[in-house]
Image (cartoon, grey):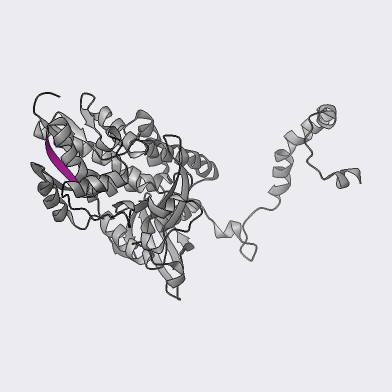
Amino acid sequence: MSEKGKVVLAYSGGLDTSVAVRWIQETYKLDVVTLTIDMGAQKYLENARRRALDVGAIAAEVVDARETFVNYFCWPALRAGALYEDAYPLATALGRPLIAKLLVDTAKRHGARAVAHGCTGKGNDQVRFDVGIKTLAPGMKIIAPARECYMTRDEAINYAQKHNIKIDVTKKSPYSTDENLWGRSIECGAMEDAWIEPPEDAYQWTVNPCQAPDEPQYIELEFEKGVPVALDGADMDGPSLIAKLNEIAGGHGIGRIDHVENRLVGIKSREIYEAPAAKVLYEAHKALESICLTRPAQRFKSLVAEKYADNVYDGLWYSGFHQDLTAYVHSSQRAVSGTVRMKLYRGGAVKTGVKSPYSLYNKSLATYDEGDEFDHRAADGFIELHGLPSRIQSRFQQGPLQNSEQKVQTIPPEIEAG
């Protein structure tokens, strides 16, 4: 890149990206345009814009992407039931493909020949950014200062201090965080020791469950085709509903996640998350599906959810496979509408009631009391047919089943002997 040009940098206002502005100017001799994206948790956007200009950016753009983020990323993941390794609601991972798209769009608008991000060489986000950007704009150059110069966190702090770059992080408080409406991630510092309990000062969205209110709070969530549309009877847009639920659930200590996860690059990493709204909504959505989906649909969707979560985590949002998974999820949610009552108490979110106009739960068939409409006489025939394959196998393969040298002991020896 010998000719003077522009680069658009994904800018959070934090340590890594503030250092990146100066580093790119020094290393590549490029003008830097910063792009700060509001996905709902950024509180000081104007400060970030001013900081970018103070550091040396020629322009600093701020984009409100809350509606887009919720409607096209959070809600689809919720409908899919996507939790990475059954724990992480993918808040950061869901934000990356949106940032990649906006980076490419902004670069094209400014005539920039490159985009940049602040990811290191050992994290997942570098993959999410790079794969997304190259899928959307194959010819776009990607600059990753933290990855290219192998700058440690202490070195980044020293670099910032040397060049008079104002930062909020210190060596005494070295947390690296990422926030959006769907969740907050916290890493680095003492938490890198998997034996140490996360320090209380790492949490900002949730109270300690031990200090949560003594009385439970009940809320009602209404869904339409798998999408939350109302809280306690009040219709709300997505960002407003999530923000309100973050406040309510966080006040009850709900949403803390301490997870040692398998990163895409092959290492295990101890990650701390706060996701109050996501935690409640996933539990509520799962409860609603339990009465609206058939047994095979529920079982198969759990497989789809795992693949969907892996695909998002691995940075493959814009892949054809993701579109295929999304098509199934969309179809599966056509009858997932109704209301779920949740009990919030001391770190827990528990379903206490669920109803739907499309419910497959039939009390007259399930009850053992008066009003039972189940045909008990049909049970004999059902059992006869259900057990037929086992009886046939026992009759015609009795020798191999009983005498195999590789026979698995399925009955305790003392019972079999008796």
Position of 347 compared to 38: left or right? right
Q: Residue at x 72, y 44 (%)?
A: 383
- Could you say which quadrant of the image residue 394 lies in? top right
Position of 167 compared to 281: left or right? left
- Could you say which quadrant of the image residue 100 lies in? top left
Q: Picture coordinates of residue 220 (x, y %)?
A: 39, 64
Q: Picture coordinates of residue 304 (x, y %)?
A: 46, 38
Q: Picture coordinates of residue 400 (x, y %)?
A: 82, 27
Q: Picture coordinates of residue 265 (x, y %)?
A: 41, 34
Frontmost residue, 311 versus 225? 311
Res 317 seen here: no
Report the predominant secondary structure element of the magenta stretch.
strand
Position of 277 compared to 293: left or right? left
Q: Is residue 139 above or below residue 93?
A: above
Position of 211 compared to 234: left or right? right
Frontmost residue, 231 versus 335? 231
Res 103 seen here: yes
Frontmost residue, 386 versus 271? 271
- The question of residue 311 being in magenta is answered with no
Q: Residue at x 31, y 58 (%)?
A: 242
Q: Residue at x 79, y 32 (%)?
A: 407
Question: What's the magenta region?
Answer: 31-36
- The question of residue 32 being in magenta is answered with yes
